[in-house]
Amino acid sequence: MPTGSNGFSTPDPGLLLTLRLARFAAVLRAAGIPVGSGEVIDALDALREVDPLDREQTRLALSATMAKDERAHASFDRLFAGFFISPQEAASRESSRTAREELQAAEDRRRMGEGRADLQFMGRQLDLTDEQLATYSRLSAAQRERLREFLQRADGDPASLDPALLPLVEHVVREHLERWRRQLAVARRAAPGANDEQIDDGYRGFVAGAGGGDDPLLQLDMQQIPAQETGRAMALIRKLARRLAARIMRRYRAARRDERIDFRRTIRANYRYGGTLIDLRYRARRLRKPRIVLICDVSGSMAKYSSFTLYFAHGLAKVVSDLRAFLFAEDLEDVTPRLRALAGTPSTLAGLAEGSKVWGKGTNLGIALRRLEDEHDRLLTGNTVFVIVSDTKTLAAAEAAAILARMRARVRGIIWLNTVPADQWDTLPAAVLLAEHVDMYQCSSLGDLETVLRRAILVGTG
């Protein structure tokens, strides 16, 4: 590595270019453009044949080697323009980002001050941490109002209150804020791009849009997708499922290539050579494909959501070790064989309902989970990602919560796809109860579905 006049090593320009190109390839992959190591090598070779200071020559060289079809070319130019910027533009963006962070910090301090003023009992500020106050500041206006109303009702007539109630009230408020802190953290993890490869923050939303996120069907509530658009919605689901499946397989194959020398086995194997390391032994990071157990609420309000989810999940069947699908309402029904037979045909959604004994009936998750434990206990292993699709409006919620608590200790993870908006969860007693034992995500659109299942499956293969 070259040494500068100050005595310190200066980066090799060729290495810097390679790293920069690798990061750009990550941006393209996140946008759904298939770019592998071969395309990156071709791009490096092409850059050696052009003037790297000529922006247009550079764009054409990279476009020719990294964008292989019409759809990729349509996104490539936008991504190139956003990623390769001048030093002046980079400095301007950094300055703007710093200014935004300072303004946000000032706004956070102001809102935390408001929180201290709001959250009082018997004329005294509650003993809350900065993190709890920050959580309060991020709640919606309606959620903050409900918490203030609780304190006002608890306050009553200060002259008749026992000061010993203060710790109890503080405990209730802390528990409320802690629950919302967890839910806000889950919402951030579920946000598009939250688990993608490392990309500059400024490009995350840009990349999501370039990847096809501007299709109106992605953002439309699944319940509101009209019948005449069902075919297009299923085609979009197939596309999203194929893209996610390809990404999972890339991770799986990369892990299988991640071999390291096993020194203990190597030394033992080479005793006969007098200690000369001739016969090298390797150990590889083992990667187990997860089993997906999907249980879908098919009561009247949930049937359409569950149908689309089942269809999406079937598109991932080849990249998980096993996919088992169940419907539930008043009871539990295994539809794995039926889903395998119907998926890929125009009658998929209607076919799932034909012959079902639970479709469209009332919801009792307690019965369904008890039946799952009794009859399918072998599915609940440390390699299972358990996915529930429901709006949490169920009978026997307490029994269901108790069973989920047991299951959580046995499986890799429990993901709950809740079709009710997250800011309404605290108005649903069952949602509050069940959220303690699962990772609950808001999921009402195809875009939500792709984002959350990406996280669920990729975590399962991590």
Image (cartoon, rainbow, N blue to C red):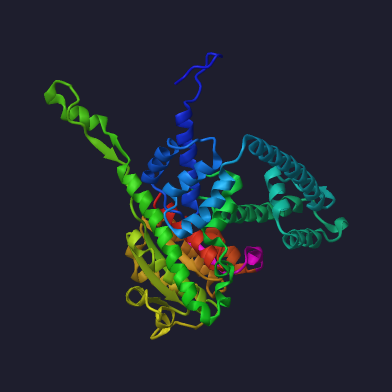
Position in image of residue 269 (x %, y %)? 16, 30
Query: Residue 49's image quarter?
Result: top left
Q: Residue at x 60, y 56 (%)?
A: 183
Was residue 417 drawn as part of the magenta stretch in this picture?
yes
Is residue 414 shown to the viewer in this render? no
Q: Exactly how many numbered labels are in the figure?
A: 0
Is residue 81 shown to the viewer in this render? yes
Was residue 381 drawn as part of the magenta stretch in this picture?
no
Magenta span: 414-427
Position in image of residue 68 (x %, y %)? 42, 54
Query: Residue 357's image quarter?
Result: bottom left
Q: Is residue 162 above or below residue 335?
A: above
Q: Residue at x 44, y 60 (%)?
A: 406
> Which one is in front, 293 or 345?
345
Position in image of residue 207 (x %, y %)? 55, 53
Residue 90 relative to residue 246: left or right: right
Residue 151 relative to residue 205: left or right: right
> Which one is in front, 437 or 97?
97
Q: Which residue reaches farthest bottom?
A: 355
Q: Is residue 417 above or below residue 59?
A: below
Q: Residue at x 31, y 43 (%)?
A: 257
Q: Is residue 316 above or below residue 105?
A: below
Q: Is residue 381 above or below residue 20?
A: below
